[in-house]
Image: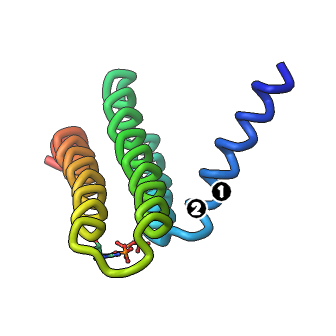
Amino acid sequence: MRRLVKSFGYALSGITYTVKTQMNFRIHLAIILLVGIAGWYFRLSAAEWVWIVLTIGLVLVAELLNTAIELLVDLVSPGFDVQAGRVKDIAAGAVLVAAGISVVTGLIIFVPKFI
Ligand SMILES: Nc1ncnc2c1ncn2[C@@H]1O[C@H](COP(=O)(O)OP(=O)(O)OP(=O)(O)O)[C@@H](O)[C@H]1O
């Protein structure tokens, strides 16, 4: 049980580090707050909330992995290296894809509420 609490603490410190150091992650959190308020205002259905939560989760997970990959690349390849750059670009691409999916999902859910 103590080991479980300890690893939970390590995971939380990874998330805290990302919040503190990654501006993009903080922007995502601000957007999540706005989406939460909009969802509450428009009284989203349970199914709509599920899609919102899943796509938000997708973006946050992608951002956490991207941060971990950036740190790892800087650790193993501190100097300029074309492959290192490519690895970072691909990780950033994963975040972009996740963000794109969440924007499209948000549009599908929220646009009909305005028309
Ligand atoms: N060691 C490297 N060698 C070659 N190109 C690199 C290297 N490090 C970064 N790059 C290039 O610069 C881009 C930005 O890298 P950086 O580490 O600054 O990430 P970032 O997107 O600015 O991260 P952050 O989310 O911290 O703002 C990478 O996507 C890559 O194209």
Kindly state the secondary structure of the residue where label 2 is placed.
helix
Task: State which quadrant residue 86 falls in.
Answer: bottom left
The amino acid type found where label 1 is placed reads: Thr
Q: In the image, is residue 44 above or below residue 61?
A: above
Question: Mark 2 Cα within 10 Å, few/some/many (few <14, many 20+)?
Answer: some
Q: Residue at the far top: name it.
A: 1
The circle on residue 44 is none
| C-alpha distance separating marks 2 and 1 | 5 Å
39 on left or right of 11: left
Q: Position of residue 26 (x, y in %)?
A: 51, 65
Question: Mark 1 Cα within 10 Å, few/some/many (few <14, many 20+)?
Answer: few
Quarter holding ligand 1: bottom left
Q: Residue at the far right: name it.
A: 2
The amino acid type found where label 2 is placed reads: Val
Residue drawn where x is 46% and y is 46% of the image: 36
Task: State which quadrant residue 87 falls in.
Answer: bottom left
Q: In the image, is residue 82 above or below residue 10?
A: below
Residue drawn where x is 30% and y is 67% of the image: 84
Instruction: Choose between 38 and 1: the one closer to the eye.
Output: 1
Instruction: Choose between 81 and 26: the one closer to the eye.
Output: 81
Q: Position of residue 100 (x, y in %)?
A: 20, 52
Q: Position of residue 8 (x, y in %)?
A: 71, 35
The circle on residue 19 is 2
Residue drawn where x is 65% and y is 56% of the image: 16
Establish whether ligand 1 lies closer than 8 Å to the Cβ of label 1.
no
Q: Position of residue 102 (x, y in %)?
A: 26, 46
Looking at the rendered image, the quarter that the N terminus falls into is top right
37 on left or right of 21: left
Q: Which residue is mark 1?
A: 16
Task: State which quadrant residue 56 falls in.
Answer: top left
